Image: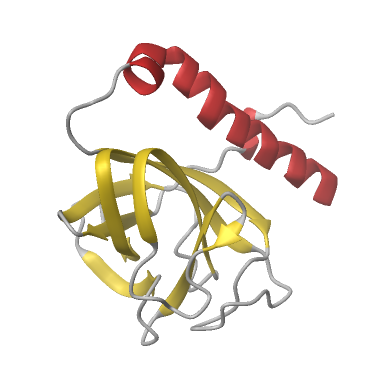
Amino acid sequence: MVVLLKAQRDKIAETCISTDLDQYSNEYLYSQPGEITGPDVRYLGFVEDKVGPWHTAVPDGEKDASFQMLVYFPHKVEIRNIQLYASNSEGTKGSSWWHSHNTESWILGVFHNGKMLNPNREDSLGVFTGWVLLELYGDNEAGCFENDRYVLFEVTTNEGVLSKLYQVTHWEDEFVRP
């Protein structure tokens, strides 16, 4: 089962990065948008254990909800924090939330190139330019990541807040099992 989940995760990551970027190669790879683009979000499922419950920034033995977020910055932009909220289809924030920075919430683990950017709930995730792919991990809470549920992402930068309302889609039905 673990091997199947890892294969699914890798296939999704490959699809998100190569197929989607290849499909839009002129937009994503070769052109340089003049403004911040994104975030574009993909749900990967419960594939890895990166964080624990509430404010615990270390694995706890339970797989976490995993997302990939793609953002383009045409110049240097500081990402101060990322927040994730359970939501409805209109984007109204629900009673469950995960923050990269705030210890009064469930932790949203933010990773870039395999490195956790917020192990101590830092006030800044770093300064980025160009296309940036982040992996986000949150402990499962109250079934918020069930199929067809909505979540709202807010990315706070030094230039403002980027928002993305996302409907959770489970990809496992799209894979042919061996």
55 left or right of 49? left
Q: Nearer the viewer, residue 97 or 25?
A: 25
Of 30 and 167, nearer the camera is: 30
What colour scheme governs how the chains and residues are painted in the rendered image of this protein? secondary structure
Task: State which quarter of the image contains the C terminus.
Answer: top right
Q: Position of residue 2 (x, y in %)?
A: 82, 51
Q: Quadrant of residue 30?
A: top left
Is the residue 174 above or below the residue 138 in the image? above
Taking the spot 23% from the left edge, 66% from the top edge, the residue there is: 93
Q: Is residue 165 left or right of residue 53?
A: left
Is residue 20 visible in the rendered image? The answer is yes
Farthest bottom residue in view: 104
Report x, y in % for residue 82.
34, 62
User: What residue is at 49 percent from the left and 83 percent from the top?
Assistant: 54
Quarter of the figure with residue 96: bottom left
91 versus 55 height, above or below: above
Where is residue 122? Give x, y as percent.
40, 76
Q: Residue furthest left?
A: 160
Pick the front one: 105 or 38 = 38
The residue lying at 32 percent from left, 18 percent from top is 27
Tally the marks: 0
Residue 65 screen position, x and y as percent: 55, 59
Residue 1 visible in the snapshot: no
